[in-house]
Image (spheres, rainbow, N blue to C red):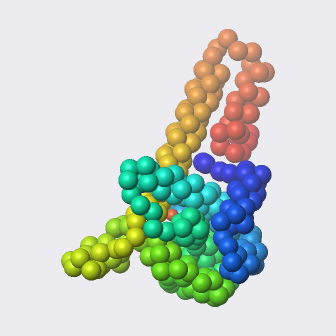
Amino acid sequence: MRELKAEQIQKNYDTLINTIQLYITGDRKDKVLKMYNDMEDRFMMAPASAKEHYHNAMLGGYVDHINRVVDLSLKVKELWEQNGSKVDFTEEELVFSAIHHDLGKVGDLENDYYVPQDNEWRRKNMGEIFTHNPKCEYMSVTDRAFFLLQHYNIKISKKEFIGIRLTDGMYEEANKSYLIAYKSEFQLRSTIQYILHQADMMAAQIEGRLTKESIEKDETEVQERIQSLKEVVGSPDKAKDEKPKITNDLFEELFGEKRW
Ligand SMILES: [Fe+2]
């Protein structure tokens, strides 16, 4: 299973706070920092999704994902510029939107959005590492992001609103009316939402693949250990007094308990 070490979780959170310090300006910077300070532990530990085969369904996965989206957003913006597209938003607007596009995944003012799945069958068979917290009243992730921002009196520009609102692109049914314009005057004016969507999708795909590689590596290691176990058990040449110790250690390593 893909996991982040405690030091990495702390390092990722420090990176996020540094990004806020660097890019967010004016009197809203203090308000943004207060929100993070009030919910520091929850920000730090939140996963980015519930299911193993989605992306970053691990403790600290949320901040790891946000940092990647910030980094990729700036790079995707450069790519658009290099290909002749004029940028009509500030770096602060882009970074602010990238940082907060999934804010609702942290939960509401009191409750985490994701809690560990305690149903062993669902964990094992459906890959549900986390599940939605029943204490958290339903809101879409994006609506909850706006709710939290307004709670902390954090003002956002129109471009930031559109950017956060549409980061999920056409994966969110409710975005259709923004992204398919039947009248030219209804067409989106800025490119910010496309850049955020491309960065978010790229980050999620990369994270999903990192998880898949990690699972495959674990499975290979288990198979190699099982093979070692079979070889030791099946070998008539091994000294009898060696077998129980070796096989018992391997059994414990593979299945987490002593066999005898
Ligand atoms: Fe995201």
Res. 164 visible in picture: yes
- Residue at position x 57%, y 85% in the image: 147
Q: Quadrant of the C terminus?
A: top right
Residue 52 in picture, x, y percent from top left = 52, 55
Residue 16 in picture, x, y percent from top left = 68, 62
Total marks drawn?
0
Name the quadrant containing residue 247: top right
Relative to 172, 36 lies left or right: right
Question: Where is 242 relative to 213, above or below?
Answer: above
- Residue at position x 77%, y 28% in the image: 245
Question: Where is 173 relative to 6, above or below?
Answer: below
Q: Looking at this view, is 201 or 90 the one in front?
A: 90
Name the quadrant containing residue 177: bottom left
Q: Residue furthest top?
A: 237
Residue 126 in picture, x, y percent from top left = 47, 59
Q: Residue furthest left?
A: 182
Question: Where is 98 relative to 260, above or below?
Answer: below
Res. 58 visible in picture: no
Q: Looking at this view, is 154 or 36 the one in front?
A: 154
Relative to 180, 146 lies left or right: right
Question: Where is 79 relative to 250, above or below?
Answer: below
- Residue at position x 60%, y 84% in the image: 155
Residue 69 in picture, x, y percent from top left = 54, 58
Q: Looking at this view, is 1 or 44 the one in front?
A: 44
- Residue at position x 46%, y 72% in the image: 163
